[in-house]
Image (spheres, helix red, strand yellow):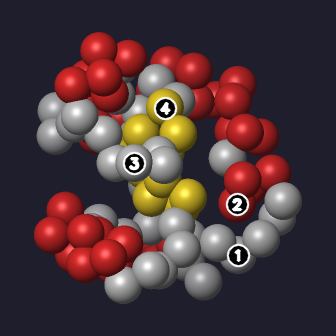
Amino acid sequence: MHSGERFKAIAAEALYEKLAMGEPFCIVDVRTESEYAEAHIPGSILMPLHELPTRLTEVPSIATNRRHRTIVVGRADARGHASQPHH
């Protein structure tokens, strides 16, 4: 699998549908605490982007080495782009 195939964007509506159908995901929210407090996906893990490198082992799908889909939620701004892989 090429690195470009490991990461996909998903529209909010499509994610909502998958969650409503019961598909299991680990959802990591990389926004700030105040943004998370305003609104967030129930069950998501708050992990602000600046803390991400030191907290990756807290992500269940990474910590247990399972092939479990992880969704990263962020804002559509420079911080959101910073969380995407660069080639």
User: Residue 46, which numbered label?
Assistant: 4
Answer with mark 2 or mark 3, whichever residue precedes in sequence: 3
- Dot 4: what SS? strand
Image position, residue 54 (x, y; %): 70, 25
On screen, 40 above or below 43? above
Residue 66, compared with residue 84, is above or below; it is below
Residue at 30% over, 40% down: 40
Judging by the rendered image, the residue that carries numbered circle 2 is 61
Indicate which disc residue 67 carries. 1
Residue lying at 15% horizontally and 69% vertically, measured from the top left: 13
Q: Type of residue at label 4?
A: Leu
| Residue 37 found in image quarter | top left
Q: Quadrant of the N terminus?
A: bottom right
* Disc 4 to disc 2, C-alpha distance: 15 Å
- Determine contact: label 1, label 4, CB under 8 Å: no
Instruction: Answer whether residue 78 is visible to the viewer in this image.
Output: no
Q: Residue at (46%, 27%) from the top-left corner? A: 49
Label 2 – label 3 distance at C-alpha: 17 Å
Pick the front one: 43 or 61: 43
Q: Amino acid at mark 2?
A: Ser
Q: Residues within 10 Å of mark 2 (few under 14, many from 20)?
A: some
Pointer 3: what residue? Answer: 42
Work out whether mark 3 precedes mark 1 in sequence or the reverse, and give the earlier one: 3
Name the front one of labels 3 and 1. Answer: 3
- Label 1 – label 2 distance at C-alpha: 7 Å
Point out residue 32 in the picture as x, y percentages from the top left corner. 35, 19
Which mark sits nearer the N-terminus, 4 or 2?
Answer: 4
Q: Nearer the viewer, mark 2 or mark 3?
A: 3
Quadrant where the C terminus is found in the figure: bottom left
* Residue at the image point whose x is 72% and y is 39% from the top: 58
Do callouts 1 and 2 mark residues in contact (Cβ within 8 Å)? yes
Three-letter amino acid code of the residue under disc 3: Pro
